[in-house]
Image: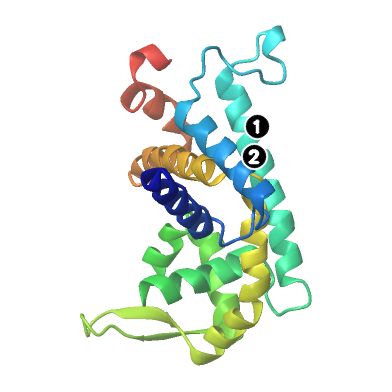
Amino acid sequence: MNYKLLKDILDLVGDFEAVNINKRYSDDISGFKRWITDKEHRENHTITQEPYWEGKENGRSAESAISTLLVHLNRYAKTYSKSAIAGSDFATQEDFIYLINLKAFGAMNKAELIKKNVHDKSAGMLIISRLYKLGWIEQVISETDRRAKVIRITDKGNTALEEQMGKIRKATTIVAGDLTHAERLELITILTKLDQFHQSVFAKNSKCKNLLDIVMNEYLPKNDQ
């Protein structure tokens, strides 16, 4: 008997169980084979030609397709988020995102909280005001700087968040669709790179009127324009 082969198979089964905690694949030989197929495809597949996108044959650029797809995905995500908060005191998905950030990263001042959510000041202040009126956040003296005030989530806010977290987790799982585990990791890498690029742009707080020219001239390589 080839014991090394048997050990390799058992190790592979262990890997399958570890990545299949969300039950994307069925817990049988059929699901196991499908997982192996996806795994081999992601590890060995090399794109030999450009993918197709709608309107390509009419001269539509890849950048246009990317922009449209990101807009569509944002709208899909908002639809699922609305379902997740239906029947609760949450008014928008931004409400629970603000609370999640405070829970995950701790107390911060208003400007930091608004910036972390990539909002302008007026929109961010409306959300903060709404959460404050609900008693889900409170303003306190900073523990590191007694001269400063920071926002933190309250026990009531934690309770409200926990009551919706089951549905919120369902919504985030659905947004990832039927991507394989490897595809999800690849997408995270690409989106993180794109997010970091735009964070560096928005950190400069450039005037809206000149924003396009500034980004084109200072941030994008000349061969990408």
Q: Is residue 201 above or below residue 132?
A: above
- Amino acid carrying mark 2 in the image: Val
- The total of numbered circles placed on residues is 2
In the image, taking residue 46 as reference, residue 23 lies left or right, namely right
From this viewpoint, which residue is outermost toward the front? 1
> What secondary structure is found at the residue carrying circle 1?
helix
Q: Quadrant of the N terminus?
A: top left
Is 202 drawn above or below residue 171 in the view shown?
above
Q: Which residue is drawn at the image coordinates 46% and 57% (left, top)?
A: 14
For the question of whether residue 177 can be seen, the reply is no
Identify which residue, 206 or 199, lies in the foreground: 199
The residue type indicated by label 1 comes to Thr
The reply to whether the C-beta atoms of the residues labelled 2 and 1 are less than 8 Å apart is yes
Task: Determine the image quadrant of residue 151.
Answer: bottom left
x, y (%) of residue 175?
A: 65, 52
Which quadrant does the C terminus fall into?
top left
Q: Nearer the viewer, residue 216 or 154?
A: 154
Residue appearing at x 37%, y 71% in the figure:
105
| Label 2 sits on residue | 71
- Residue 60, horizontal then vertical, whole percent: 65, 14
**Residue 79's image quarter?**
bottom right
Can you give x and y, in whole percent of width and height, for residue 170 in the image? 67, 64
Which one is nearer the viewer's eye here, 147 or 11?
11
| Mark 2 neighbour class, 10 Å CA radius: few under 14, some 14 to 19, many 20 or more | few
**Within-10-Å neighbours for mark 1: few <14, some 14–19, many 20+:** few
Q: Name the residue tied to disc 1.
A: 68
CA separation in Å, label 2 and label 1: 5 Å
